[in-house]
Image (spheres, coloured by chain):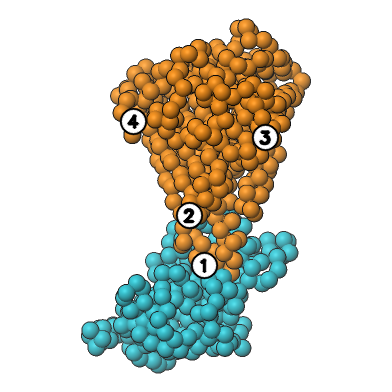
Chain colours: A cyan, B orange
């Protein structure tokens, strides 16, 4: 059992305060959806937790099983069991997917995987996500389509098996087929019940495939409303207008 | 014309076998302004004594002739005429030249190896190497520079009609070496030339690879990788002179720099003359600056004198490691040092992959690994 506890998190970019005290707890077996309009600070939350250098923490804590992630380096956080599926995965020239994945698995699991087992896991993972085998030899994210990048993020999620996964708009830019494939990957990851998911999205569409237990509405850098899955239906019907108006 | 006041074609028109035709450089000349003359140990001004201990040895597979010949041999200086002071100095000072000949239509299974090994920096050594690849022959030449030396040389690659020559030149000198060389390739009709330069060691290395064409259809690829550590000056000056129609050239040099006083210089000159219609050329230089105190000067120059080119372009970038790359790898648990190594290895490795000889590619890769581990 793991718990990610975000306590009164405040984050700035440069002089601009983006997050104004976020409180949220995600436990193993739970899926939390964070929904909100563009510019509400959803992605900032994701990147700040992961430790992107652009974001400055101005207050609060992010505890994973009691350990403050904000005290750790980016890679230490990942090794502690945090995973961020990025909205815009960066292209890294000259680093092959297979080399990258092996390095990541080795780092996160603390030992190099047996080559044969790794090859097997990789193939199974790629097959399940409808990723062509030739991908393994390509450079990391280089020339990948938007959908390919997202599937590759989920492949990493399945291989690294983190305690808590944060998915930052993994659904954006995906057609329905790709969305289904990606959602199935997330559901495989969830099905053990030993992992928690924080799913950030602008649209309710993905929630039809990945059912959340809790829905949090984000506006102006904090959670403004919380509820169960029914809250997503309400947002679907009414949009974010009431929240943006209230915060303006 | 880039930063030069004069057109490239005039900048490169001076060529002579006579040392007196070249002034002693002062450092203000376009061709010398980046080079720290004081560290040349007298190669440029005649004060270097010719008492150096450089041993050059050739290992050739069967069917290839390798000879040491006197200065009067007709094959010397045919493809290349010295174009600067040190080149002329070397031309006038070498004792015997190494001439390697790959006969017509011979296809070599094994590379020709030339070892240039220095025994110290007391006194200078001068060398001259000619590699002749006769028509339709195919050969690989690996030149390795090792040890410690004050060394200047001219190397001529004469590639015959329809012939293919691949060259790897590895500058793996010790920290105090000073090395100044011209490597000139002359391509006949439909000749193919592939050059791979790897410069890692030395206090000062100034290498000038150049290409000329004597017939149409010539095809030259010039790739280079360098890793510059604190205090090193590694300079590569390329010249591709397109004077015949329908020839191709591609230049891709990449380097990584780290440490105080690490200095990389890359000059990429391409001339497309009036006669050279249908030329297709591209040149690229990329520098990865890993620490403060390192500096890369990168100057691509392209002079087009004909209206009929198939393609002509150049690009130059010098920058830091991309934070986003490092973040992405770290976010997958990979520690910073390893993430950094992966990115640098990837940056250089894309080029190194192009070396088609497994053994050499592995050696170059492990040499780069060793640099990264420093």
Secondary structure under tag 4 reads loop
Q: Where is residue A148 in the image (x, y as percent from the top left)?
A: 48, 61
Q: Compare residues A151 and A141 and report the one nearer the observer.
A: A141
Q: Position of residue A102 (x, y in %)?
A: 64, 62
Instruction: Residue at 44%, 35% (x, y): give it.
Output: B34
Q: Which chain carries label 3?
A: B
Q: In which quarter of the image is the N terminus of chain B?
A: top left
Can the viewer see residue A8 in this picture?
A: yes
Q: Which chain carries label 4?
A: B
Question: Residue lying furthest front in this view?
Answer: B47
Same chain for marks 3 and 2? yes
Residue that label 1 marks = A153
Instruction: Residue at 48%, 73% (x, y): give it.
Output: A51
Q: Do the residues labelled 3 and 2 touch (CB within 8 Å)?
A: no
Residue that label 3 marks = B148
Q: Mark 2 lies on which chain?
A: B
Can the viewer see residue A143 in this picture?
A: no
Distance of mark 3 from mark 4, alpha carbons? Answer: 35 Å
Sequence order check, earlier mark of 3 and 4 = 4
Distance of mark 4 from mark 2, alpha carbons? Answer: 28 Å
Distance of mark 1 from mark 3, alpha carbons? Answer: 49 Å
Q: Compare residues A209 and B42 and report the one nearer the observer.
A: B42
In the picture, measured across the screen, residue A59 lies left or right of residue B69, that is: left
């Amino acid at each position: 059992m793991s718990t990610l506890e975000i306590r009164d998190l405040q984050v700035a970019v440069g002089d601009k305060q983006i997050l104004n005290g976020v409180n949220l707890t995600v436990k193993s077996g739970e899926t939390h959806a964070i929904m909100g309009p563009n510019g509400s600070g959803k992605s900032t939350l994701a990147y700040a937790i992961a430790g992107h250098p652009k974001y400055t923490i101005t207050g609060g804590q992010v505890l994973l099983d009691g350990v403050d992630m904000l005290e750790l380096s980016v890679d230490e956080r990942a090794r502690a069991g945090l995973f961020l599926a990025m909205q815009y995965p960066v292209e890294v020239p000259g680093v092959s997917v297979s080399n990258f994945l092996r390095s990541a698995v080795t780092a996160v699991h603390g030992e190099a995987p047996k080559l044969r087992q790794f090859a097997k896991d990789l193939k199974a993972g790629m097959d399940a996500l409808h990723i062509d085998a030739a991908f393994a030899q390509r450079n990391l994210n280089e020339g990948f389509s938007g959908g390919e990048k997202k599937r590759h993020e989920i492949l990493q999620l399945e291989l690294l098996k983190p305690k808590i996964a944060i998915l930052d708009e993994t659904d954006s830019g995906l057609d329905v087929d790709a969305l289904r494939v990606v959602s199935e990957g997330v559901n495989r990851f969830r099905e053990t019940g030993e992992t928690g998911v924080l799913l950030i999205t602008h649209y309710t569409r993905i929630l039809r495939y990945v059912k959340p237990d809790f829905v949090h509405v984000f506006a102006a850098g904090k959670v403004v409303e919380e509820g169960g899955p029914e809250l997503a239906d309400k947002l679907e019907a009414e949009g974010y207008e009431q929240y943006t108006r209230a915060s303006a | 014309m880039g930063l030069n006041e004069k057109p490239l074609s005039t900048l490169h028109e001076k060529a002579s076998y006579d040392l007196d035709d070249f002034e002693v450089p002062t450092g203000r000349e376009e061709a010398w302004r980046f080079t720290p003359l004081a560290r040349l140990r007298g190669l440029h001004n005649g004060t270097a004594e010719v008492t150096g201990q450089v041993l050059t040895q050739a290992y050739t597979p069967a069917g290839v002739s390798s000879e040491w010949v006197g200065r009067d041999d007709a094959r010397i200086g045919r493809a290349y005429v010295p174009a600067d002071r040190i080149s002329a100095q070397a031309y006038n000072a070498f004792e015997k030249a190494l001439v390697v000949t790959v006969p017509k239509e011979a296809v070599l299974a094994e590379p020709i190896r030339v070892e240039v090994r220095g025994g110290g920096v007391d006194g200078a050594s001068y060398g001259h190497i000619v590699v002749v690849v006769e028509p339709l022959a195919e050969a690989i030449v690996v030149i390795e520079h090792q040890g410690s030396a004050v060394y200047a040389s001219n190397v001529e690659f004469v590639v015959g009609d329809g012939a293919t020559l691949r060259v790897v030149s590895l500058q793996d000198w010790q920290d105090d070496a000073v090395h100044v060389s011209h490597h000139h390739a002359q391509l006949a009709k439909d000749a193919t030339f592939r050059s791979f330069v790897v410069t890692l060691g030395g206090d000062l290395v100034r290498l000038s690879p150049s290409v000329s064409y004597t017939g149409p259809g010539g095809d030259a690829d010039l790739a280079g990788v360098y890793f510059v550590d604190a205090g090193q000056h590694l300079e590569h000056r390329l010249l591709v002179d397109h004077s015949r129609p329908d020839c191709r050239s591609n230049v891709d040099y990449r380097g990584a720099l780290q440490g105080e006083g690490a200095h990389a210089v890359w000059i990429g000159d391409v001339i497309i003359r009036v006669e050279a219609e249908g030329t297709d050329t591209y040149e690229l230089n990329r520098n990865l600056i890993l620490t403060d105190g390192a500096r890369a000067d990168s100057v691509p120059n392209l002079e087009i004198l004909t209206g009929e080119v198939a393609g002509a372009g150049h690009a130059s970038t010098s920058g830091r490691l991309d934070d986003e790359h490092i973040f992405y790898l770290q976010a997958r648990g990979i520690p910073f040092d390893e993430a950094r190594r992966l990115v640098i290895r990837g940056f250089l490795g894309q080029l190194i992959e192009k070396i088609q000889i497994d053994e050499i590619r592995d050696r170059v890769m492990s040499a780069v690994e060793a640099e990264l581990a420093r």
